[in-house]
Image: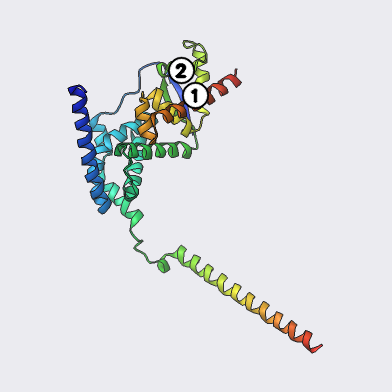
Amino acid sequence: MRKYKVNREQPVKLPSKEAIEKYKDFSRLTHDYDKIVKRPKVPLYKDKRMFFVLLFVALMAILLAQAAKEEETEEENGAVEQVDE
Amino acid sequence: MNPTDLTELKNKSATYIEDQQLILAAKKDPRAFGALYNKYFEQIYLFVFKRVQDEAIAGDVCQDAMLKAMHNIRKYEDRGYPFSAWLYRIASNEVNLFFRSQKKMFTVEVEDKHLKSVMMEVKIGQIEDEDDQEKLIKVLSNLKPEHSEIIELRFFMQYSFKDIAEFYNITEANAKMRLYRILDKLKKTWDSKA
């Protein structure tokens, strides 16, 4: 956060043109821009972290699908037993 | 209209037309943003510097602001305000973000003459009383960066209401209303701490 302080002496000096030029760098800006815009060079499956995330998502999907299938079979069995009675 | 006003108007429209051409080029190819970057970097850097008062931080914040501008140039819409106003707003948002990201308190100096002008406008405290000035500093420090921004523009950076209106993309009347609303808030906080 920011807090103010009273300055009773000399006002803050503005930087010179030369000092400002030091921070002017369009090639750095284009480099940063490319980092944001361009697709990553490493494909998703080759990125270790992303690979594990994808693996986790896939496993969860399989588990959920299996659980749903089991539930469905149980319900069907239950219905058959009721008819038999 | 006197000849000076006419020349100023001509210069303004020349800048406006030039900017529109540069913006169009940058919308087609973001690499063409370089011309706008070179034209406005110094102005934006100084604006950021006045708010953060640190050369290196101003450099980083200014670069971040320019990056956002370059990234969003396609979304830029001409609403009759100068292009620089759009850049100033992005830069100011970056400054506010920077202040918010600071875990330790970041100190910004304010000249006592600027504090006195706030006190005169809001009609609070004794202008020459250093304790009252310190009290105002505390009240100002407790304002959200978005709220203190307009006070900084008007009193610390001496922006006219026309400049503030361009900055926020609003009318002059709305700029006045926005400022006086914040000053009202400031007065209430001051009175509650009396």
Label 1 Cα neighbours within 10 Å, binned few <14 / some 14-19 / many ≥20: many
Asked which secondary structure carries label 1, the reply is helix
Reading the image, the residue beneath label 2 is B121
Q: Residue at x 57, y 23 (%)?
A: B188
Reading the image, the residue beneath label 1 is B183
Q: CA distance from mark 2 to mark 1?
A: 9 Å
Q: Residue at x 39, y 29 (%)?
A: B172
Chain hosting mark 1: B
Asked whether, in this view, residue B147 is left or right of residue A75, the answer is left
Quarter holding the N terminus of chain B is top left
The colour style of the image is: rainbow
Q: Amino acid at mark 2?
A: Glu
Rendered image quadrant of residue B159: top left
Choose between B176 and B62: the one closer to the eye: B176
On residue B152, the disc is none
Q: Amino acid at mark 1?
A: Leu
Chain hosting mark 2: B
